[in-house]
Image (cartoon, helix red, strand yellow):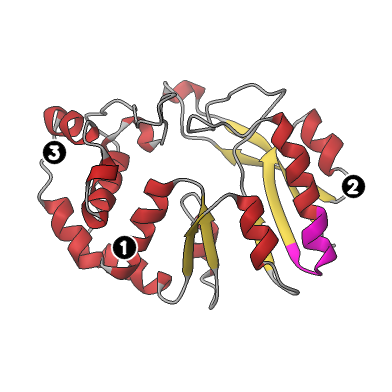
Amino acid sequence: MGSAALFFFLEPDNALLSDVNGDLVNAFTAVRDHPIAVHNRLKKLPTGSDSYYKTRAVDPDELPPLDAAARFIYLNRFCFNGLYRTNTAGKFNVPYSPSKTGRIPSREKLIEVSQKLQGKRILQADYAKILGSHVRRSDFIYLDPPYAVENRRIFKQYGPHVFGSSDMEELASCLEKIDAKEASFLLSYAYSREALDLFGGWTTHRVYAQRNIAGFVKHRRRACELLVTNIC
């Protein structure tokens, strides 16, 4: 699911959104079901460095779901570059950024997002389990996994359990199963030798995407990506 950017662009009548990140899934679910309550909690969180680190230090597992959702959105808006990253213990550890990270979403924006999510299923689960139990004929599946290049941890990945090269074979197997069910898929991945070796049998497109996560603006550049699909 990630930011669910493609979902919000397409606005399908029916959709299932999933991610392994429980904090992210909780935030989407809370905004879908209680947008005004989430906004009211966001308004109570002061801005500034001290408040940011105090909020970051709170264990989200000890918070009620709506408070945990507000914490997640707050940290995402005021952390460095708006990225999500955790340490080996699974604790969010991105530092505070004093400016240019955005604002707290307005009440109207959260209501708008909630309306678009109405009737949509949001699940926390490993992608392979979702694909194994939910894919049906004529479905369209979009997959945007973390990138693994020669099993190196790269900056786009997050979390203590990193998607690695060994997981790519399982991903390739999942694509075969999707196709066998006569469903359509689109996979976006880093353009790399590993990806071409595994996914080159499908229809592929080389594209460029602007990357905005980097320590310095001069290092933010277009990245080469590979789109893989069974749609001819």
Disc 1 target residue:
31
Tag nearer the camera, 1 or 3 = 1
Tell me if 223 is positioned left or right of 174 in this view: left
Q: Which residues are magenta?
A: 176-184
User: Which residue shows up at 40% across the image and 35% down it?
Assistant: 83
Which is more toward the observer, 101 or 90?
90
**Which of pointers 1 and 3 lies earlier in the amino acid sequence?**
1
- Indicate the secondary structure of the residue bearing disc 1: helix
Q: Residue at the spot x=42%, y=21% of the render? A: 216
Q: Position of residue 139 (x, y in %)?
A: 69, 71
Question: Which residue is labeled 3 in the image?
Answer: 47
In which quadrant is the C terminus drawn?
bottom right
For residue 208, side relative to residue 217 (left or right): right
Q: Which callout, 2 or 3, points at the residue further toward the start of the chain?
A: 3
On the rendered structure, is 38 left or right of 225? left
Residue 88, percent from left and from top: 44, 24
Number of labels in the image equals 3
Cα distance in 3D space between marks 1 and 3: 21 Å
Q: Earlier in the sequence, mark 2 or mark 1?
A: 1
Farthest residue, direction right: 201
Residue 143 can be seen in this image: no
At label 1, counting other C-alpha atoms closer than 10 Å, the crowd grade (few under 14, some 14-19, many 20 or more) is: many
**Could you tell me which residue is drawn at 55 percent across and 70 percent down?**
15
Q: Secondary structure at mark 2?
A: loop
